[in-house]
Image (spheres, coloured by chain):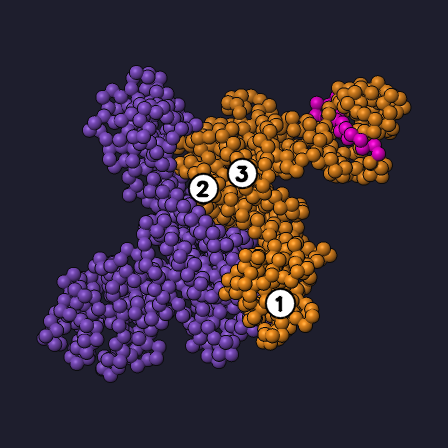
Chain colours: A orange, B purple
Amino acid sequence: MRSHYCGGLNEAHIDQEVTLCGWVHKRRDHGGVIFLDLRDRDGIAQVVVDPDTPEAFKLADSARSEYVIQLKGRVRRRPSGTENSDMSTGMVEVLGKELVILNKAETPPFPLDDYVDVGEDVRLRYRFMDLRRPEMLNKLRFRSKVTSYIRNFLDGQGFLDVETPILTRATPEGARDYLVPSRTHQGSFFALPQSPQLFKQLLMVSGFDRYYQIAKCFRDEDLRADRQPEFTQVDIESSFIDENTLMGIMEQMVREMFHDLLDVELPTFPRMPYAEAMSRYGSDKPDLRIPLELVDVADLVKDVDFKVFSGPANDAKGRVAALLVPGAAEKLSRKQIDEYTKYVGIYGARGLAWIKVNSLEQGAEGLQSPIVKFLGEDVAMSIMARLGAKDGDIVFFGADKTRVVCEALGALRIKVGHDLEMLEKTWAPLWVVDFPMFEDDDKGGLTAIHHPFTAPSCSPEELEANPEAALSRAYDMVLNGTELGGGSIRIHDPVMQKTVFRILGIDDEEAQNKFGFLLDALKFGCPPHGGLAFGLDRLIMLLTGASSIREVIAFPKTQSATCMLTQAPGEVDDKQLKELSIRVRKQDSDAS
Amino acid sequence: MRSHYCGGLNEAHIDQEVTLCGWVHKRRDHGGVIFLDLRDRDGIAQVVVDPDTPEAFKLADSARSEYVIQLKGRVRRRPSGTENSDMSTGMVEVLGKELVILNKAETPPFPLDDYVDVGEDVRLRYRFMDLRRPEMLNKLRFRSKVTSYIRNFLDGQGFLDVETPILTRATPEGARDYLVPSRTHQGSFFALPQSPQLFKQLLMVSGFDRYYQIAKCFRDEDLRADRQPEFTQVDIESSFIDENTLMGIMEQMVREMFHDLLDVELPTFPRMPYAEAMSRYGSDKPDLRIPLELVDVADLVKDVDFKVFSGPANDAKGRVAALLVPGAAEKLSRKQIDEYTKYVGIYGARGLAWIKVNSLEQGAEGLQSPIVKFLGEDVAMSIMARLGAKDGDIVFFGADKTRVVCEALGALRIKVGHDLEMLEKTWAPLWVVDFPMFEDDDKGGLTAIHHPFTAPSCSPEELEANPEAALSRAYDMVLNGTELGGGSIRIHDPVMQKTVFRILGIDDEEAQNKFGFLLDALKFGCPPHGGLAFGLDRLIMLLTGASSIREVIAFPKTQSATCMLTQAPGEVDDKQLKELSIRVRKQDSDAS
């Protein structure tokens, strides 16, 4: 029905007869002729219809915003002085000769060209209109380009695209599962997968050697801004491979993608041990664009009377750290510091100690701070020395349980970095490696930092002897403070797998019950293997600079897990529920 | 960990040092040396380990079937007379020098090289072993190749890959939905999509112009041999397109795929109206490899006393048809004809009349048949004349409701064609077009033959005046008697859409309630559009010659919708059900 896309017209088409199809983006009368901006996926072309073609003129005159039309005409150069260099089609226009109105349109629920004030609820309710906006359509078009790119890269590297089930068994990621009642097995339920983890490991056992899948995953959790109940994962696994080779292929993929799709040359990704990342940045996904670091000062404040500092300094599980912000003294008002105090409170910090460095020459006198008097001049000055502080800097402190200090100062570091526009790079990728195998589960036990199938970098005997010291063969790819993907070399030895389960408090019976098919598989000749999964939605969000994950998903759900467009979830007939042998519990009734 | 795949070795590698990884396919002692057939994804290489390398020899000696090993050695030409031309690696072998046992294996639950007698249940229970068999792995590898091929083709044609939701609202395909209880909206349920139909139409409304997705779809139906609760669809939609253009692109895709992946040149697909397909083949997906056709003879038997024939012949909803099988008289025994009688009974036929043509010259005397005496010689001979019967042929008859005759004789046509090895072609594709819009729903109403969004080829007024006569703009791609894909030009006019709903007995309120977002979308400038969906599983099954859809799905479910491997569906804690506000009904209790 068309010869060209609107957005594809340029001076090469001058004097050609073209047929365009699209939406009336704008319509205006000017000097007795009608101008239509005709929009399609590729852009906007200016169409002129004059009274010399009375039929077309009449139809053009009746057209309104978002009418769908087909137009035949001849491309011509725009009159001198009316060119629009902001548009790719801005040097030409189409003199319309025949016009067909393919469909009419009621007045849109919100304007498509100026949506700043449109609430997200309305945008999601009329998502089919919202997606008409070129910036939305282009984000999803870019997403399609990225998935093609990734697929072609992985195909080229010999990875096979294999589909794994959506209706499956509860998987071990530990989040809440979405359940699907079975009709044929009364009282039984499928679970939607939180990831294809076990299936991809089984494919390695089967000898597929290299697997990938762009897979839908599901978690029924309370949603934060960047989470969705269903999300998409680029899921990858390979056999007979070590972490260096796998990380190499993945890094190559991301670097080539940045080069080919964004024209950006990423540096070789540095590798940083988890312990270093936590120590210097308070985060296992440090944003290296920001030139600020946490510096430990516990040893300097061990003996001060100020319990807020000396307490954590003398606690094996505590941490006292400082964050030096160069030149911030002038830029941060007292009010802003108070706001930062509130901000770190979100992460559990009970306050935010700070020192404004007015004049180091004056010693304690030159340090403006509520805490210097508690620290004493010697300690304060030795902290300044360690930090390399200069006049005009501000130092923030965190003193608490290690986790609280890392989270609070780590978050503050990012916030201050952004507030003071300190970002030194556009893109700062890295690998975080050498994660611990386990962490406290706060109930006296241990929990896996990655998942229970991650291989440790020691023997089963060493692992059992000192699980808390064991490091895993896991790796996370981090970009600009966001975890793009994470993975590990997996356990391929059934003895090691059972050891890990035991350390996690899963006895042999429970292990067999929950993961019997995996344990079986390990017994029958499982190759060494490992893999990685990228969060596709977050990757696209980062690549497109979108402000929310919902901007890069065609039909997202709200934070209450509702689809505003289709009004899902919805009520169903009792007949359906009967077929499934289930019943809705009465509200506020707990009886079974 | 490897330098080459086992299956990739050939004479070009002679004298090279290689490192291989894989599974011990077979191990044998011969003349004091050990031969290992080492298997990986690409094939099998013969490895020789001799006592000159005692360490490797000892390990090779200890290796058992399905052990995972890494082997370093030198490629050499096999001694003259020991080459194996059946294997791509059969001219060479590897003299092993270093061997590492990467993992051991217990004795497999069934032999991998001779599985004819292994029940499918066992194969599915140990799917990770079953998939090791080269024929299984190769089918799934081919599947990966096909999906890549399709994606690259569609990318090249400007189709955008867009993901649509899995957690959504009940969709209108009419099969039973899988439901997912919502935790945050007590008593509400998501449905898993039976297809992305409405979402892809919305993407057209949004101006995506061309969309595709390889999408998981779900139907909770009792399963036939070639159905799965979750299945995969290549889902395609385009705007500003008519059926000819769309069918052209799809045909091009399939023809190029056959050329590039199978080295098969498909002919241009003929187009056959639905009415012709039903008349000549008794099926809307005729298998054109078989040179047999149904021929109507109702006019010839209208007046015979034989009510079995004259009844349907005089019934507007009846049909009397004959199927001539050339040269079958000698090939089909009386016993086989009795079996065919049972076979058509499956399709509702109450018997199978037949005539064996022994000698046309002898008139009725030369026709061996239980029914000729009821028809009379004139009628019998005029039927023979119409069919162009010759001595040695057999004619089968169907006389009943049109639907029964089509189904019974249509199925018999296929069966006889296969039994007598009459297939004239390897591949016989076609398009079936000009479907009716509606058919009887057997409750006095009408039901949509495709779905309620299919455009008719007439105006809303004409449609309303005579819905039963209306044809749709739908098309099915058929290959060898299997529907590969089906689609249609969709309704883009809200008036037409409401008319169709009305004819289907869906009043405006119900329409708004169920499909309000679609009706909304049609109002705001919906372009003309249409699309198609291919059943990927079935396509792969056909392309690989697999006997069941389960052979081309990595982790399929049984016919009772169970995963033998993971034992899904399974029981869940009552705590989980409480969170979801649901409860399992007690068995055999209907009370609510």
Give the distance between the C-alpha atoms of the residues marked 2 and 3, in whole angstroms: 15 Å
Residue A155's tag is 2
Secondary structure at numbered mark 1: strand
In the image, residue B417 above or below residue B73? below
For mark 1, what is the residue? A48
Sequence-first tag of 1 and 3: 1
Q: Dot 3: few (<14), some (14–19), or many (≥20) neighbours within 10 Å?
A: some
Residue occupying the far left of the picture:
B362
Image x and y of residue B284, in percent: 36, 66
Tell whether B446 sits left or right of A382. left
| Residue stretch in magenta | A314-330
- Residue at horizontal 36 percent and vertical 48 percent from the top: B261
The reply to whether dot 1 and dot 2 touch (C-beta < 8 Å) is: no
Tell whether A31 sits left or right of B261. right
Q: Amino acid at mark 1?
A: Val
Identify the subunit bearing mark 3: A
- Numbered disc in front, either 1 or 3: 1
Sequence-first tag of 2 and 3: 2
For mark 3, what is the residue? A256
Identify the subunit bearing mark 2: A
